Amino acid sequence: MGDENKLLQDCLEKLKALPNIQVTPKKIPNTKIDSSADGIITIRSPLKSVDYVYAIQPNVTGTTAELVIAYFKLHQEKLTKKLFLITRYLSEPAIAKLVENNIEFIDTAGNIYLNSPAAYILIRGQHRPKEKYTSPLQITPNNLKVIYILLKLPNILKASLKELADAAGVTSTTANHTLKNLYRLGYLQRQPGGNYRIAHYSKLLERWEIGYIESLRPKLLLGHFTPVVKGKLAEILDNIIQQAKEKNFLIGGELGAALTSSYLVPTGATLHVKDNYRLIAAKLKLKPSPEGKIIFLQQFGLDNAGDYNQAEPIADPLLIHAELMMENNERLEETAKRIFIKYIEPRQQNA
């Protein structure tokens, strides 16, 4: 992870340049610590010394800040030390969200937020550095399709490159290029015989969800819709379930989460479609609306469906979880946590 190491060193130099602040990086001890952590730093001032577990998230934008905040809150529950964000550059909207949620951070421009017994420091408004970071993996929508399949079917790494490419809906060249770069970034490990295995499932999952929200989902988005005639939401959602069985589309979002967890009372749905979505919208008596709670997304690859042993055609937990994590909403975050424990964590354990 050479690019991330440079990012880390640049951020540490900014911290060390602060008056009366000493910074000491440490290795993570061989004890159980959240796998999202990248290391430990001690920040020392004349007042106090505080240990932080730091996590490197190279690209945090105003769009993805909510997701990063949600992840940090989940990880902080498992840690005895404070959690610290290290990133490339934070815009003012992203900084505002992080400060509001008390997520401490530093970026390579020198935007800094510390709020601990060691020091209270808030520096914002620093401009983006001119130096370019050239990560070997530019996270494109096609890269994300490959990452999705790896997270869904970790054992596909033992299959042929063509099988992986077909499942993801990309070319073999793209699949091969993505695997090589994921290896260079440390997400994959080499196995005897030349195959790979996933080295850091939880960090790859975070990379997938941030990329899904920022670049893949906008490419898949077909539109937001609302009922032509206002009626009871329960009746509309029941109709969606019936039509999904007949019209061969997958139910995701809040409705998909409600069907799989029996916990959430849904206020909308995300529909993953293969065919003409306008015909489906017409059958459901929906009309376009920017604020509509019924969202249509185009399916990709061959395997967007989940395996729940249920009659309803429901999207994969990875797609549902990512949709729920888009909002900084306790109701949805709790449901996402339940879906992760029940459906995604077993994949992580078997990766």
Image (cartoon, rainbow, N blue to C red):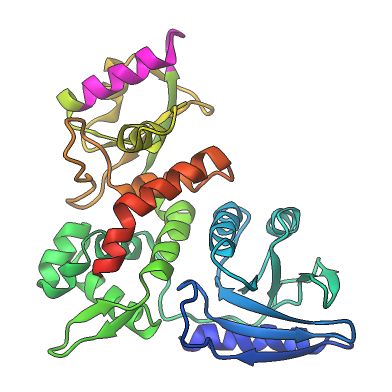
Residue drawn at point x = 68 percent, y = 74 percent: 107
Task: Reply above or below: 348 against 329.
Answer: below
Task: Judge from the rendering whether residue 171 lies leftward or rightward of residue 144; answer left or right.
Answer: left
Q: Can residue 145 be seen in this snapshot? A: no
| Number of numbered discs | 0
Residue 76 in the image: state x and y as whole percent: 59, 63
Left or right: residue 282 versus residue 231 is left
For residue 265, say whether it is visible: yes
Q: Is residue 36 magenta?
A: no
Q: Nearer the viewer, residue 80 or 294?
A: 80
Image location (x, y in percent) of residue 347? 27, 61
The vertical placement of 39 against 315, above or below, is below
Magenta stretch bounds: 227-244
Q: What is the x, y in percent for residue 324?
A: 46, 43
User: Image point 61% across, 77% down: which residue?
Assistant: 53
Please report the residue visible at 53 percent of the width from the left and 38 percent of the height from the top. Answer: 331
* Relative side of 208 to 77, left or right: left
Vertical arrangement, residue 334 with respect to residue 1, above or below = above
* SS assignment for the magenta stretch, majority: helix
Q: Quadrant of residue 209?
A: bottom left
Residue 239 included in the magenta stretch of the image: yes
Residue that appears at 34% across and 39% down: 297
Rendered-image quadrant of the C terminus: bottom left
Q: Position of residue 328 (x, y in %)?
A: 59, 45
Q: Quadrant of the N terminus?
A: bottom left
Q: Nearer the viewer, residue 288 or 267?
A: 267
- Residue 107 versus residue 3 in the image, above or below: above
